[in-house]
Each structure stands twice: as structure tokens, then as C-alpha cells.
Image: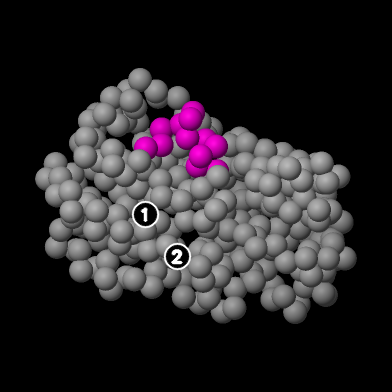
Amino acid sequence: MKNILFFTEIYKDLGSGNLVRSLHLLNFLKKKSPHFKLFLSIDDSGLIKETNLLDNKVDVISLNELKNFFFDCVIYDSSNPNIENINFLNNISKKIVALDFFNYEIQINSIINLYCHNSDNLNKFKGNLYSGLNYAIISEKIIKSKIKKNNFKNRILVSFGGEDPKNNTLKVLDYLNKINEKSLSVRVLVGELNKNKKEILKYNKLFKVTGHTNKIHEIYKKTDVIICGGGTTLLEALFLNIPAIVLPQNKFEEKFVLHISKNTNIFKLSNLKNISKIFEKMKKNSHKSVDGMGKKRISKIILS
């Protein structure tokens, strides 16, 4: 039996995207390779207790316990790579596969990036490098939802993940209130770690504000435009071919969104003043830029 470790994080100001992505991949591998033993280790400073992201079916190992194990592969998913952690993981594993990893001077076996930031240093990396939207990780619920957009009803979803460190949710709601576009029907998802939740809830009389949900695929069926950051929600919008208005939440998202915006249905917030133009473009460009096969491609790399 092979042992595989998912090493990820959830920190304030970094959000929960890395953990959510790792869980999607872990659950996919669990179904496809039931003879493997899968573990999860989270660098979180206790923040995981504030979320409902984990269930009892996941074997979670503390950082201190890792030294008692040896793994055939470690999947490293961190927005803030720690060289000490990586050196430690190298010592307790045969190989490391890192997701969205941009320090090419650190030598590990494989890197899988949606977009290669810091590309000037690519020549310093000696391992295997994979890049592109083909490696986007989409949850099985979203993949199986089979949403088809035949008509548009001006239904807007505002969602900036678990934490929203730049307070973009409130900024968007202030903007929507200011333009006072009566034709828009707005739904707002507020993450469990959002520190501005009370301020956002004040808009509940104008917009439908709700908390974390496990039925996001049902909400997407009633969504015509998504306003989001440049992470998980954007990738889901690209898979479902729902137009997205994107407010990046860090420098990596800024570069990523700029890179893909030419060939995808990404718009600016000001487009909401004339939303019909968004739908006109959508009818002309129905091409899906994310195919939902990312987990399968990554699994092949992990198991090779």
C-alpha cells in the first residue's frame, strides 16, 4: 500500500483556497485509487477550527507526527512556501509534487502551475514542470452539475472565497448600491473567515446575503454573472462558462488573470452598467477554457 500525503495550509490573509483544492484532489484520488493510504497535514495555526471544511473521513496528521511516517509522494500546496518544511518533507518522502509553486531555485520532483509566475528563473528548475488551465482542479459536484446557459436574467453572484482578505465583497456591494441598477438580482456568499461579515450583512435588505454552502452547484444554476477573485471560484466559472468579473486578491492572481483574460470571458466591474454587452459577448464566445480533467491529469503525475 502506498502512502500519499497532502501538505497544505490555511492562514489569515491567505484564505482557504489551498486547503479546498487539496481536498478536491484527495477525494478524487481516494475514489480512483482506494488501495492507497491518503493523509492530510495542515499548517494552520488553529484556524481550521473556524471552518466546516474537514470531515471525519480524512486522516489528518499534525506537523509533529509527520516524522513517524515515510511517504511515496507528498503533494505540496502552499501560497507561501517554507524551505524548512520542504527540506523536511524531502527527507520523509520519495518525491514531492507542488501545486502553483513559483520558487524555481528549490529543487523538488515536479511543479504543476496554472500559470508560471517568475518565469525568468525557470531555467534554474531541474525537475518536471507542467503548466496551464488543463491542470485546474474542479470539484466533482461542479463537474456533474451540467449547467447550460440558454438565456440570461441579470442574476449576479458575489463570492470572494472563505476569507476575502482585501474586503472585496463590501467594495462590490458599495459599488452595486451606488450604480443602483434595478434590473440586477444580486446574491452574496460570505465566507466563514470573513472578518467584515457584520458590515456585509447590513446589505441584506438590498441583496440576498448567505453564508457558506455545500450546494454551490445549485446556486450556479441560478447565476448569470459571477463577481469573484482570481482563485477557485474563477476556475469554476470558466468551467461552467459563466462570465466572470474578477477582482484579484493578490499579486499572483493579478498576473494570472491578466494572462488568461484575452482568451476567456472575464470582464471589468464597470461592465455591470451595461450588462447586456456581457451577454452579447457570451453568445459569441461559448468556448470552455477549463475542461474539468485537471484532477485526472495531476493524478497521473502523482502516480507516475
The answer to whether any part of residue 146 appears in the image is: no
The residue that mark 2 highlights is: 165
Q: Residue at x 66, y 57 (%)?
A: 77
Q: Earlier in the sequence, mark 2 or mark 1?
A: 1
Neighbor class of circle 1 (other Cα within 10 Å; few <14, some 14-19, many 20+) is: many
Picture mark count: 2
Front in this rendered view, residue 86 or 46: 86
Q: Is residue 77 above or below residue 279?
A: below
Secondary structure of the residue carrying numbered label 2: loop
Q: Residue at x 46, y 51 (%)?
A: 248
| Side of 291 relative to 147 (left or right) | right
Q: Which residues are magenta?
A: 256-267
Neighbor class of circle 2 (other Cα within 10 Å; few <14, some 14-19, many 20+) is: some
Q: Residue at x 24, y 68 (%)?
A: 201
Secondary structure of the residue carrying numbered label 1: strand
The amino acid sitting under disc 2 is Pro
The residue that mark 1 highlights is: 159
Front in this rendered view, residue 209 or 82: 82
